[in-house]
Image (spheres, coloured by chain):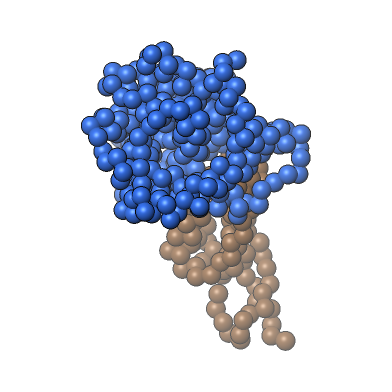
Chain colours: A brown, B blue
């Protein structure tokens, strides 16, 4: 078996309305891959039932290296400072690389 | 209770809305699958656009229709302006701008319910009123973005550059005019206009025959949604915002009816103008305001529009505005 590689998992929770804004920001930071899952829930922005665009959330998962994470987090922080409702969670993960020597 | 209000309440689609609210209130697990609810909302826009376009092709745009469109544009500029000035006194300016945009724009489903109500009452209205609805969707967004920019400049410390939004005005305008729901309505209106009566007949089994049933299903979902927002939302609306959400529609409708009477519009067009002015957006505007005015609290403007103003207009507002028009057009 190939060796597990240490990576960072950035989990972003935001409104579906802001999905494109967040993804454009990630792309500018060199992120090419991500996974999006529709989500519902509740918080200070009200109930997110997942029925209308205005009350639907998404969870965006991005696996990336630490340097790229720092760049992206600075951009996400700028969005949050401007008032955009985004939650960012960072986890340390181990990932089985797609092929030997691949870069994320 | 007036007979108009009673007739409105015993309409099957309205009763499904009430049923949805009750089912949500007793915490029933009844739900319409989200994908279907999304389809229903798109269907209603397609049907509305096709019928409006075909009627416009049949009748053309008479002078009264041009006047109605002018009045719609005027209301689209007036409502967010005085709405902002009223709200600004007791609400933070970004929330005020966002709420003003929400109330300056329109709710397509409220407009559809009003058309159904007028048809039941035998009151005629022009196909151009669908164009009026399209025209009223966007000006409030532009005004709110300008207001928010003004507030940002004012809030900057002396000598400091004003904090800028993360998005340019150009980007916001692009979002406003290319929003999926907005674009679908315009596309359907154009297709209905181009294909005219022949297109209307071809599409009738889809756009007309099943319309009422789909509207009932969508209103059932909206009822469930309203109940859930009221029950589970952590957002507690301040008393003055609640009053705004319930009284502003009546005030906006009164201004619209007075304007329509002054311009000599037909009664049906006047009632639809009043309903458009009284309604608040809960799909297009909240989506764009999240982009354009991130400082505003989405839970406030969305809850006011969806959980307060929408049910008020559907249950009481439409028959009320129609009854008020009876005094002016008698």
Write the residue at 27% across / 22% down.
B263
* Residue B215, position as x, y percentages in the image: 56, 42
Who's the residue at 35% across and 34% down the image?
A: B126
At x 53% / y 47%, what residue is drawn? B209
Tell me the quarter of the image containing the N terminus of chain A: bottom right
Q: Is residue B123 found left or right of A1 in the rendered image?
A: left
Relative vertical location of residue A98 with respect to residue A19 in this rendering, above or below:
below
Give above or below for A82 relative to A100: above
Residue A104 shows in the view: yes
Count the labels in the image.
0
B66 relative to B99 in the view: left or right: left
Instruction: Identify the residue at horizontal 36%, vertical 50% (top origin).
Output: B197
Where does the image place residue B330, in percent across and percent down from the top left? 38, 13
- The spot of residue A51 in percent (x, y) is 60, 47
Q: In which quarter of the image is residue A66?
A: bottom right
Residue ranking furthest to the left? B63
Residue B118, percent from left and from top: 46, 29
Tell me the quadrant of the picture where the C terminus of chain A can be found: bottom right
Return the residue nearer the eye: B234 or B103: B103
Tell me the quarter of the picture where residue B267 sits: top left
**Residue closest to the eye, B27 or B11:** B11
Q: In this view, does B142 lie to the left or right of B15?
A: left
**Residue B226 visible in the picture:** no
Query: Is residue B12 or residue B133 the one in the foreground?
Result: B12
């Amino acid at each position: 078996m190939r060796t597990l590689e240490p990576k960072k998992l950035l989990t972003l929770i935001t409104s579906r309305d802001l999905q494109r804004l967040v993804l454009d920001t990630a792309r500018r930071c060199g992120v090419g891959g991500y996974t999006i899952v529709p989500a519902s829930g509740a918080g200070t922005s009200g109930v997110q039932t997942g029925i209308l665009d205005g009350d639907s959330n998404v969870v965006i998962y991005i696996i990336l290296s630490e340097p790229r994470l720092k760049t992206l987090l600075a951009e996400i922080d700028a969005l949050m400072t401007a008032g955009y409702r985004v939650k960012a969670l960072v986890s340390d993960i181990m990932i089985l690389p797609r092929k030997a020597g691949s870069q994320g | 209770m007036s007979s108009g209000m009673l007739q409105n309440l015993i309409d099957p689609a309205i009763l499904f809305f009430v049923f949805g609210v009750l089912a949500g209130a007793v915490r029933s697990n009844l739900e319409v699958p989200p994908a279907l609810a999304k389809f229903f909302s798109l269907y209603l826009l397609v049907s509305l656009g096709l019928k409006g376009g075909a009627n416009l092709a049949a009748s053309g745009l008479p002078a009264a229709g041009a006047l109605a469109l002018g009045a719609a544009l005027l209301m689209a500029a007036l409502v967010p302006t005085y709405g902002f000035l009223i709200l600004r006194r007791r609400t933070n300016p970004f929330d005020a701008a966002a709420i003003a945009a929400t109330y300056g724009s329109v709710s397509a489903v409220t407009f559809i319910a009003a058309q159904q109500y007028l048809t039941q009452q035998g009151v005629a209205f022009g196909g151009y009123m669908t164009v009026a609805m399209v025209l009223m969707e966007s000006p409030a967004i532009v005004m709110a973005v300008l207001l928010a920019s003004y507030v940002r400049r004012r809030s900057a410390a002396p000598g400091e550059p004003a904090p800028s939004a993360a998005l340019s005005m150009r980007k916001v305008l692009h979002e406003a005019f290319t929003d999926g729901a907005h674009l679908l309505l315009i596309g359907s209106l154009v297709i209905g206009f181009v294909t005219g009566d022949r297109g209307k007949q071809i599409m009738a089994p889809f756009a007309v025959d099943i319309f009422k049933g789909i509207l009932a299903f969508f209103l059932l979902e909206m009822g469930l949604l309203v109940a859930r927002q009221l029950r589970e939302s952590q957002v507690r609306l301040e008393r003055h915002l609640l009053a705004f959400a319930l009284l502003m529609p009546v005030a906006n409708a009164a201004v619209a009816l007075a304007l329509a009477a002054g311009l000599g519009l037909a009664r049906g067009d006047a009632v639809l103008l009043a309903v458009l002015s009284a309604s608040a957006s809960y799909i297009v505007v909240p989506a764009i305001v999240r982009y354009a005015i991130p400082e505003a609290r989405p839970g406030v403007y969305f809850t006011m529009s969806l959980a307060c103003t929408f049910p008020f207009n559907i249950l009481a507002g439409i028959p009320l505005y129609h009854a008020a028009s009876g005094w002016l057009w008698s």
